[in-house]
Amino acid sequence: MRTLAQECMRRFKVSHEFAPPAAPLGPRSLMDRRYGLTDQRLAGAFGYHLGERDPRTHPVAEPSPPVGKVLTVLSGSGGSEKVNGMRVPARGCAGEAERKIAGSGGLGPVDLAQDLNGKSFHDTRADRRVAEVFGAWSGCMEDKGFSYPDPLAAMNDRRFQGKRPVPEEIRVAVADVDCKARTDVVGVWFKVETAYQKSLIAKHRKALNAALAQKNRQLAAARAVDSGG
């Protein structure tokens, strides 16, 4: 997108200094910490924080916003429909770049897939089997001197949301990981959610296949841009 937008802007003889790509922060994958913290070494070192990948320890870059002709060319708004004698494309160079990658489809994550992913996670938290293993985990934590109804409550404790881990957070996180292992929280929850997701996939297979085909077309178009095609 950035490459295509810049190429488009050069046609209009305007330029803009885009913010550099953000560093890879946060969980390493969609599954990393889906069921909470599971690594004892990381728990002892960072509590529920993410070490060097924790967004809370990295300042957010604030690039200068485009103005004047640059804004008009980039977004298609903020001025006349022509710049330097040429008509600005619909939604500007950003819109043109998006159309070259996505065509008439939406760019980025597919709403249906994201919705189903969130639904399976939410619904399985209330599943009897998961609720039972949460109870076992909670009892294990109680034996260690900590009171939480489930692992997500521990991870989201407001006391542990600062930029750096605090000693109590380390103690809770270490106990959390140990109790997850003792009660097989992750194994049970994963098995239950896998069954939920397979059911949802079967129910929405046609729409998901169409979304996958659309995503593959976008990825192919993006790879072609990256390779200079």
Image (cartoon, rainbow, N blue to C red):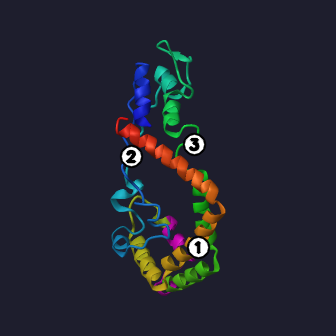
Q: On the rendered structure, is 37 left or right of 104? A: left
The kind of residue tagged 2 is Ala
Q: Residue at x 49, y 69 (%)?
A: 155
Q: Residue at x 52, y 27 (%)?
A: 92
Left/right placement of residue 11 relative to residue 192 reads left
Across and down, in percent, residue 178 comes to: 42, 81
* First of labels 3, 1 by sequence position: 3
**Residue under pointer 1:** 195
Q: Is residue 201 left or right of residue 157?
A: right
Q: Residue at x 54, y 76 (%)?
A: 191
Q: Which label sits on residue 106?
A: 3
Q: Quadrant of residue 172?
A: bottom left
Find the magenta span and give its range: 142-158
Residue 109 appears in the picture as rendered? no
For residue 160, the mark is none
Question: x, y percentage for residue 119?
Answer: 62, 63
Specify the label residue 22 is tagged with.
2
Depth-wise, is mark 1 or mark 2 nearer the camera?
1
Q: Please identify, in this view, whether the residue under mark 3 or under mark 2 is nearer the observer.
A: 3
Q: Is residue 79 magenta?
A: no
Q: Determine the image quadrant of residue 174.
A: bottom left
Q: Amino acid at mark 1?
A: Ala
Q: Residues within 10 Å of mark 1 (few under 14, many from 20)?
A: few
Residue 5 coordinates in the image, percent (x, y): 44, 31
Mark 3 burial class by Cα count in 10 Å: few <14, some 14-19, many 20+ = some
State yes or no: residue 156 in magenta. yes
Task: Say which element carries label 1.
Answer: helix
- Which label's residue is closer to the chain start, 3 or 2? 2
| Residue positioned 39% across, 67% down in the render | 166
Mark 1 or 2, nearer chain start: 2
